[in-house]
Amino acid sequence: MITPYRTRISILAGFILLVLLVGCEQESPAIKIGAPAPAFGLARLEGPTIRFPEQYRGQVVAIRFWADWCLYCHDEMKALEPVYRRYRDRGLVILAVNVMQPPETVRPFVERLGISYDVLLDRQGEVMRGYRVMGLPMTFVVDRQGAVRARIVGESTPEVFERTIAGLL
């Protein structure tokens, strides 16, 4: 059970991270729509390390950045699960990139959600910085050729997410 003190500390830590992210955003421009998605390798919460984009060529990939302290991430991650299940056979992949949290924090959060898409661990925040993430949640949608086709800043509804991926599948 999360205590009120731990909740406040988590929210404070998240706020500090967001302030740092926004500060960094001013130094580097956002990834342009149509540009190749930056490559990365990350450990899965469960299973072997993944290599993006090499392992995902020919698929539509949603790269979602999140943390358990993010007030909007819980509902959004749970709401996207049915969309993922509906479209995964047509080539949709969701990579849920946790930002700078240890597996012992991430695992119980993910288990409570019951999601089936891959959860990745960006322990040092390198991928987050490479994608110039300025707040959480943030989602990048990458087409079958590896180009960024959309960026969703903040919480997305299943309807918005589905409209975003529809023309790419």
Image (spheres, grey):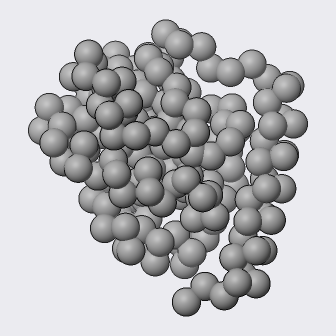
Residue at the location (40% across, 40% down)?
157
Above or below, 147 against 129 in this view is above
Residue at the location (46% across, 39% down)?
156
Q: Name the residue furthest left.
A: 89
Expressed as whole percent of the image width and height from the top left, the position of residue 161 reads 36, 33
Residue at the location (44% across, 57% down)?
75
Task: From the viewer's perspective, tell me whether residue 13 is left or right of residue 132.
Answer: right
Task: From the viewer's perspective, tell me whether residue 66 is left or right of residue 77.
Answer: right
- Image quadrant in which the C terminus is located: top left
- Front in this rendered view, residue 130 or 166: 166
Expressed as whole percent of the image width and height from the top left, the position of residue 101 reads 63, 65
Task: From the viewer's perspective, tell me whether residue 108 is left or right of residue 135.
Answer: left
Expressed as whole percent of the image width and height from the top left, the position of residue 66 reads 56, 52
- Image quadrant in which the N terminus is located: bottom right
Task: From the viewer's perspective, tell me whether residue 130 is left or right of residue 5.
Answer: left
| Residue 39 in sight here | no
Expressed as whole percent of the image width and height from the top left, the position of residue 126 reads 68, 44
Residue at the location (16% across, 42% down)?
86
Above or below, 154 against 80 in this view is above
Among the 4 quarters of the image, the one containing residue 32: top right
| Residue 87 in sight here | yes
